[in-house]
């Protein structure tokens, strides 16, 4: 006998949690199915352990923390963020939590263990797993990924990182701080490719000054594990490491049975959804990283909140366009809001940009953090801000104000005429805008 639910959510990451609670709190009968841990990739293998590692690596530079203590402290932070209720407080919101790996037997019907659950609506919010690039020998060399690196038994003295995106850069620098020799291999022409080119260059120089080796346009020919060593061969030479960490993209995790039911995927293999989150299967929706949109916790929960509202009301309008900022937690940090200069020039006839270096501002001088800059970009005819890119101390926080200004269509003159406290990092954005006002 099939058990009936208004909503079944598969996956308890940021996206699944937001949707389940939206409907659970409205008194709907909701089940959440999770196969591993509550909290998804962010809490268990992503944002939380990586930010804890970055923080602890800075402390270790002064205090010298051994690796096993760092691992223990990361786990303590995760426990703290997770909270004490093993059910994640879902029962309070009227949600039934079901553990296991479900299989779709029809678009509205799921089998899990000896239970059959039917949902009026079902949301797939199953996220992604680390992708392993098809480099000969890599998969057999037992590479580390974000699923294993935070619990590995020993810190490697020599670490290769494959992938120069945010995860590779953040973790690479953290291990360098802990004393590892780190080489980041990036196949493309620069690291942090989604950033403004000048930001990416500044970040590269800053990381290299701190002893991180960066190999761009790196064509890795093969990877071999030989006893305790990992050998990486490129067309430029052969390198020997103790471990290799792969941070080179993500692969969607699609629940069992959906392929057989004809679920439509987009060209990269993520679930294809309409603007409001529907898949091509009746009553089946998808949200979060598994849909291949912006892969950030804050975007997953934003998108999921809107999809949840549509399921609740039986409507289907596109998730509203919004500006989504992001940060890279390197030192210096990167904060990204809106268009890069290249994108702005491709979008508008007239574009103006200004760069203000941190060394010109008293807060950065007084705190001895004079590395980096902000670049602000306006649409030339109106003076409206369309992009702001920080690479400096506190960039992850500074980007919030820039996001607000761009989202609400402020001009550079609007920001320049707003008084900011002295001496603070926030003046950087104001005085950069003043150059375009
Ligand atoms: C190292 C790293 C650092 C990151 N740092 C940041 C950061 O600083 N800021 C930021 O915004 N984002 C960061 N991210 C990205 C962020 O983690 C994701 O964008 C976010 O977790 C996506 O949420 P989600 O709900 O879509 O999926 P997930 O968090 O991946 O959750 C999916 C859930 O579904 C479950 N699941 C999967 N398949 C099944 C199945 N068949 N049956 C049942 N359950 C299933 C999984 O166990 C998981 O719990 C980071 C990611 C990584 C890897």
Image (cartoon, helix red, strand yellow):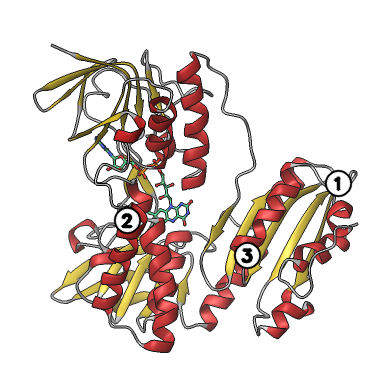
Distance from Cα at disc 1 to Cα at disc 2: 43 Å
Residue at 66% across / 52% down in the picture? Answer: 337
Q: Residue 395 carries which label?
A: 3
In the image, residue 11 above or below residue 279: below
In the image, residue 84 above or below residue 158: above
The answer to whether the residues at label 3 and label 1 have Cβ atoms under 8 Å apart is no
Dividing the picture into quadrants, the one containing residue 9 is: top left
Distance from Cα at disc 3 to Cα at disc 2: 24 Å
Residue at 40% across / 23% down in the picture? Answer: 285
Distance from Cα at disc 3 to Cα at disc 1: 27 Å
For disc 2, the marked residue is 45
Q: Is mark 1 within 8 Å of ligand 1?
A: no
- Label 1 neighbourhood size at 10 Å, few (<14), some (14-19), many (20+)? some
Q: In this view, does 349 lie to the left or right of 75?
A: right
Quadrant including the C terminus: bottom right
Depth-wise, is mark 3 or mark 1 nearer the camera?
A: 3
Q: Can residue 253 be seen in this view?
A: yes
Indicate the position of residue 44 as horizontal and vertical percent values: 31, 54
Q: Residue 370 carries which label?
A: none
Indicate the position of residue 391 as horizontal and vertical percent values: 64, 67
SS at badge 1: loop
Depth-wise, is mark 1 or mark 2 nearer the camera?
A: 2
Pick whichever of labels 3 and 2 is earlier in the sequence: 2
Indicate the position of residue 382 as horizontal and vertical percent values: 89, 44
For disc 1, the marked residue is 350
Pick whichever of labels 3 and 1 is earlier in the sequence: 1
Nearer the observer, 96 or 292: 96
Pick whichever of labels 1 and 2 is earlier in the sequence: 2
Residue lying furthest left = 114
- Label 3 neighbourhood size at 10 Å, few (<14), some (14-19), many (20+)? many
Q: Is mark 2 within 8 Å of ligand 1?
A: yes
């Amino acid at each position: 006998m099939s058990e009936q639910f208004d909503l079944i959510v598969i996956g308890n990451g940021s996206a699944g949690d937001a949707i389940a609670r939206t409907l659970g709190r409205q008194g709907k009968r909701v089940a959440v199915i999770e196969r591993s841990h509550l909290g998804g990739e962010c809490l268990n293998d992503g944002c939380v352990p990586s930010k804890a590692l970055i923080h602890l690596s800075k402390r270790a530079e002064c205090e010298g923390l051994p690796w096993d203590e760092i691992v223990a402290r990361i786990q303590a932070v995760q426990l703290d963020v997770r909270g004490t209720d093993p059910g994640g407080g879902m029962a309070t919101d009227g949600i039934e939590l079901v553990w296991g790996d479900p299989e779709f037997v029809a678009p509205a019907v799921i089998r899990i263990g000896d239970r059959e659950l039917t949902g009026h609506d079902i949301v797939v919010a199953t996220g992604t797993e680390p992708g392993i690039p098809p480099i000969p020998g890599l998969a057999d060399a037992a590479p580390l990924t974000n699923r294993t690196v935070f619990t590995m038994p020993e810190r490697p003295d020599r670490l290769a990182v494959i992938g120069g995106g945010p995860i590779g850069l953040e973790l690479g620098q953290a291990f360098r701080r802990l004393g590892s020799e780190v080489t980041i291999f990036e196949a493309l022409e620069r690291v942090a490719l989604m950033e403004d080119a000048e930001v990416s260059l500044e970040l590269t120089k800053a990381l290299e000054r701190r002893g991180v080796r960066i190999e761009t346009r790196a064509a890795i020919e093969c990877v071999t594990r030989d006893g305790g060593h990992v050998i990486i061969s490129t067309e430029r030479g052969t390198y020997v490491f103790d471990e290799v960490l792969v941070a080179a993209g993500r692969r969607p995790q699609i629940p069992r049975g959906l392929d057989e039911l004809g679920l439509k995927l987009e060209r990269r293999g993520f679930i294809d959804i309409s603007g409001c989150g529907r898949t091509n299967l009746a009553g089946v929706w998808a949200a979060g990283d598994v849909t291949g949109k912006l892969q950030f916790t804050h975007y997953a929960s934003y998108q999921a909140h809107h999809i949840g509202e549509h399921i609740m009301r039986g409507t289907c309008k596109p998730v509203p366009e919004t500006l989504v900022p992001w940060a890279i937690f390197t030192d210096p940090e990167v904060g990204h809001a809106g268009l890069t200069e290249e994108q702005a020039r491709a979008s508008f006839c007239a574009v103006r940009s200004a760069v203000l270096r941190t060394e010109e501002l008293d807060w950065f001088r007084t705190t001895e953090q004079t590395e980096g800059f902000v670049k602000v970009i306006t649409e030339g005819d109106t003076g409206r801000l369309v992009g702001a890119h920080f690479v400096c101390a506190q960039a992850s926080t500074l980007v919030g104000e820039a996001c607000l200004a761009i989202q609400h269509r402020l001009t550079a003159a609007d920001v320049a005429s707003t008084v900011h406290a002295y001496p603070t990092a926030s003046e950087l954005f104001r005085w950069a805008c003043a150059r375009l006002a």
